[in-house]
Image (cartoon, rainbow, N blue to C red):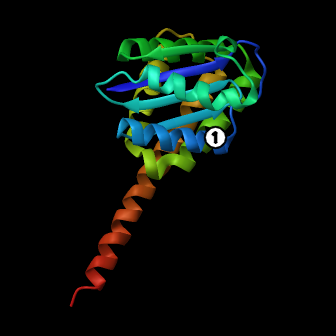
Amino acid sequence: MLKSVFISSKKHKLSLLISSKEVSSLSDFLEIAMNDKVLILNTNLGIEIYYQSDIDYTNLITHSFLLISSKGRNEATEYRIAPFSTFPELKNGMQQMLERLNSMPLAFSCYSKSIIHQLNKNYEKNNQLIASLFSVWKQILMLQNLNEQSNFKLKKFEKTLEDFGEKSNVNTILKQLIANATNTMRQN
């Protein structure tokens, strides 16, 4: 079951909450502590932490993030933390975020570019989590289209997701074909 914790600053500053090196450390720690894969998307709007588990790790994730962010002398009260431990909660939270971003074209453009870049970077390690995340995004975007509330930015985001999904599938298939070919070549 896909779960998530969204963390953002209450000060509405458009900068990363923690550095990419700190994201890597947080990801490594959480994967060891939870004994499962973790996907962290770090954007100027905040941090989105995704994981698949039957157990709710909201407290572990929140306290780990706060420990890392405290190096910058930040306090817990400076952050907005939204846990999503059920699928309807996650879907609703992501839909609200996309609707809010839709009203801010520049922020939406920066967000979608950053997300796609990070997904490309993390695809090999977290392809199952990314597939689950894509499934949620597609459901939300289809709902938007059914409600006819969709506009150019949402359609562009949907197209970007489709392109990424096709590219990822092709890369996976090509890698499998190459692996099969090299295995066959090495047999006597």
Q: At which x and y percent is residue 39?
A: 49, 37
Q: Mark 1 points at which residue?
A: 22
Q: Quadrant of residue 181?
A: bottom left
Q: Which amino acid does label 1 sit on?
A: Glu
Q: Which residue lies furthest to the left in this view?
A: 188
Horizontal side of 132 relative to 42 (left or right) equals: left
Q: What residue is drawn where x is 55% and y is 27%? A: 48
Q: What residue is drawn where x is 45% and y is 52%? A: 124
Q: In which quarter of the image is residue 56?
A: top left
Q: Residues within 10 Å of mark 1 (few under 14, many from 20)?
A: some
Q: At which x and y percent is residue 97?
A: 58, 15
Identify which residue, 182 or 37, lies in the foreground. Answer: 37
Is residue 130 depicted above or below 169 in this figure?
A: above
Q: Quadrant of residue 154?
A: top right
**Total marks drawn?**
1
Q: At which x and y percent is residue 153?
A: 65, 24
Identify which residue, 33 or 141, lies in the foreground. Answer: 33
Q: Is residue 144 visible?
A: no
Identify which residue, 23 or 41, lies in the foreground. Answer: 23
Q: At which x and y percent is residue 54?
A: 28, 25
Q: What residue is drawn where x is 41% and y is 32%? A: 51
- Secondary element under disc 1, as helix, strand or loop, is helix
Quadrant location of the C terminus in the rendered image: bottom left
